[in-house]
Image (tube, rainbow, N blue to C red):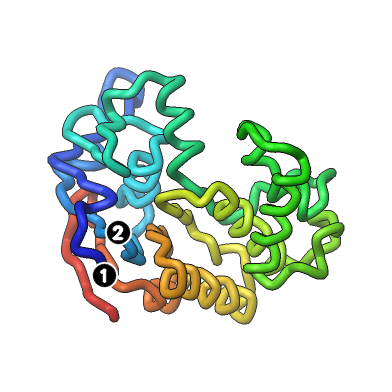
Amino acid sequence: MSSEQPVVSLRNIVKGYRRGQQTVPVLTGITFDIAAGEFLALMGPSGSGKSTLLNLIAGIDRPDSGQLIVAGEDIGQLGEADLADWRARHVGFIFQFYNLMPVLSALENVELPLLLKDMSRAERRERAELALSMVSLADRMAHLPSELSGGQQQRVAIARALITDPTLIVADEPTGDLDRESANDVLHLMQRLNDEIGKTIIMVTHDSRAAEHAHAIMHLEKGELSGREEIR
């Protein structure tokens, strides 16, 4: 694990949501760091704030108070346009339900994040082919999502997350819609991306067996950190 500055640094993060006239607290005073090259699993019961915390780190949502520095940027201070640009450069997303475009091939789905980049179609295609090869789908590039298994669709989603070479990969229940064999394949792939190319990964999961693929498990209870368990 790297001794450099942490990729993620949270200091006294507070977040709540309005419900009628009331503010419902979700996160209360969260403080921790995530090192470069770490694979961290976030666990906790439903409503504990796991996905909210992941969304804050990914720049999808904003804290009510506290400091949130990710990839060297105080993202709580960025305007919407700058925040969108920051996300495109620094964050790769993996979702539970893949979020693939059904009318596009695997290759075209992986290419999508590069459409905002200043590069030729040939360059985009070359990078997308490489990303699909990295997730062992070189022979499925022309297939539509409906022609792929759930595990294969999630591997396409992982290739899409990798295509911009992001600083950070955030995964929200990435195996929640998969059978056990497909889930294990996806988890081993994520572990390999972390071990072999040093990708920093933060994964929300309800599955303790999935969490065991991480370096450490961080537990949330009612919006507060309740402990950190080192795995490997």
Q: Position of residue 70 (x, y in %)?
A: 30, 42
- Relative side of 175 to 101, left or right: left
Q: Quadrant of residue 24?
A: top left
- Of the residues shown, which amino acid type is indicated by label 1? Met
- Relative side of 115 to 68, left or right: right
Image point 61% across, 63% down: which residue? 177
Circle 1 crowding by C-alpha within 10 Å: few under 14, some 14–19, many from 20: few
Label disc, if present, on residue 36 of the rendered structure: 2
Label disc, if present, on residue 110 of the rendered structure: none
Image point 42% across, 62% down: which residue? 199
Q: Position of residue 151 (x, y in %)?
A: 67, 69
Q: Is residue 145 visible?
A: yes
Label disc, if present, on residue 1 of the rendered structure: 1
Relative to 72, is 153 above or below?
below
- Relative side of 48 to 224, left or right: right
Q: Upstream in the sequence, badge 1 or badge 2?
A: 1
Q: Position of residue 42 (x, y in %)?
A: 33, 60
